[in-house]
Image: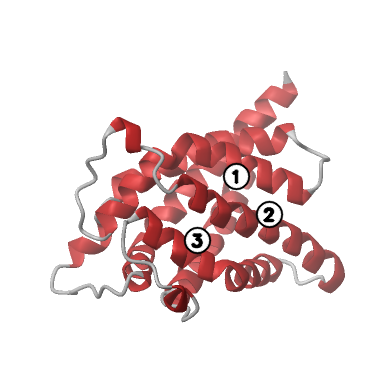
């Protein structure tokens, strides 16, 4: 019974932290998505930065429930296995919502036929799994070797993003159905937005998780 309560607590706390941090950093994510396909956003209409935020909220709720459930289930299997398997399970459930979020961010209508709900899923999976798995693995190694505390999360996130950013750009082009040029994926367009977004997301998430744990 106590294990079930602890799992429920992890899911609720983790899901809430994911949703709030995603909303806080959403405008930067929108800038990143558009930068990756070579599109500039006019700041005359600030509301455009939040287009599709409702899909982001749904996406994070689904991810939070599935990810933390699988992650807890695979306890003691190692950070790489936990991170990779949890990401695959979460993305498998949330991709249709993620797809609509991306289309909304670049100004396209998020109306998708049922048979196309998993367009770009393969490339999204190839991008997300290495990023998350590397992040968890690097975080553990950095924490054990360098004892940097909270900075371990920021450093592992930065390194995992630098390694996988070309693939992230390719994924964005695939999902939004924009022309893909290999040379463009190597220019690191949108990397600074992605870096600041992830830094803000990680910082907000860690702060919220710490607060929730103290309250509960």
Label placed on residue 201: 3
Q: Earlier in the sequence, mark 3 or mark 1?
A: 1
Q: Which of the 4 quarters of the picture holds residue 42?
A: bottom left
Label placed on residue 53: none
In the displayed structure image, the side of residue 197 where residue 42 appears, left or right: left
Give the residue pinned by disc 2.
133
Image point 69% across, 60% down: which residue?
A: 134
Image point 68% across, 54% down: which residue?
A: 133
In the picture, which quadrant includes the N terminus?
A: top right
**Secondary structure of the residue carrying numbered label 2:** helix
Label placed on residue 87: 1
Q: Earlier in the sequence, mark 1 or mark 2?
A: 1
Q: Position of residue 103 (x, y in %)?
A: 28, 53
Q: Earlier in the sequence, mark 3 or mark 2?
A: 2
**Secondary structure of the residue carrying numbered label 3:** helix
Q: Position of residue 12 (x, y in %)?
A: 54, 35
**Secondary structure of the residue carrying numbered label 1:** helix
Do callouts 1 and 2 mark residues in contact (Cβ within 8 Å)? yes
Do callouts 3 and 1 mark residues in contact (Cβ within 8 Å)? no
What whole-number distance in Å separates the C-alpha atoms at marks 3 and 2? 17 Å
Q: Nearer the viewer, residue 103 or 12?
A: 103
Q: Nearer the viewer, residue 26 or 2?
A: 26
96 in relation to 176, above or below: above
Q: Which of the 4 quarters of the picture holds residue 7?
A: top right
Q: Nearer the viewer, residue 144 or 63?
A: 63
In the picture, which quadrant includes the C terminus?
A: top right
**Color theme of the render:** secondary structure
CA neighbours of label 2 inside 10 A, class few (<14), some (14 to 19), many (20+): many
Furthest residue to the left? Answer: 44
């Amino acid at each position: 019974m106590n294990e079930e309560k602890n799992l429920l607590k992890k899911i609720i706390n983790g899901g809430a932290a994911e949703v709030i941090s995603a909303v806080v950093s959403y405008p930067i994510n929108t800038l990143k998505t558009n930068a990756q396909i070579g599109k500039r956003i006019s700041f005359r209409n600030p509301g455009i930065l939040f287009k599709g935020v409702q899909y982001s909220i749904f996406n994070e709720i689904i991810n939070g429930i599935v990810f933390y459930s699988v992650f807890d289930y695979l306890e003691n299997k190692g950070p790489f296995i936990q991170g990779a398997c949890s990401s695959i399970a979460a993305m498998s459930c949330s991709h249709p919502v993620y797809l609509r979020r991306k289309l909304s961010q670049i100004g396209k209508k998020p109306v998708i036929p049922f048979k196309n709900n998993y367009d770009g899923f393969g490339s999204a999976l190839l991008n997300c799994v290495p990023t998350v798995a590397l992040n968890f693995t690097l975080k553990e190694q950095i924490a054990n070797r360098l004892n940097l505390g909270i900075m371990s999360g920021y450093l592992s996130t930065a390194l995992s993003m630098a390694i996988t950013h070309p693939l992230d750009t390719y994924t964005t082009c695939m999902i939004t159905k924009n022309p893909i040029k290999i040379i463009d994926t190597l220019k690191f367009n949108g990397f600074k937005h992605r870096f600041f977004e992830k830094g803000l997301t990680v910082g907000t998430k860690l702060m919220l998780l710490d607060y929730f744990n103290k309250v509960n």
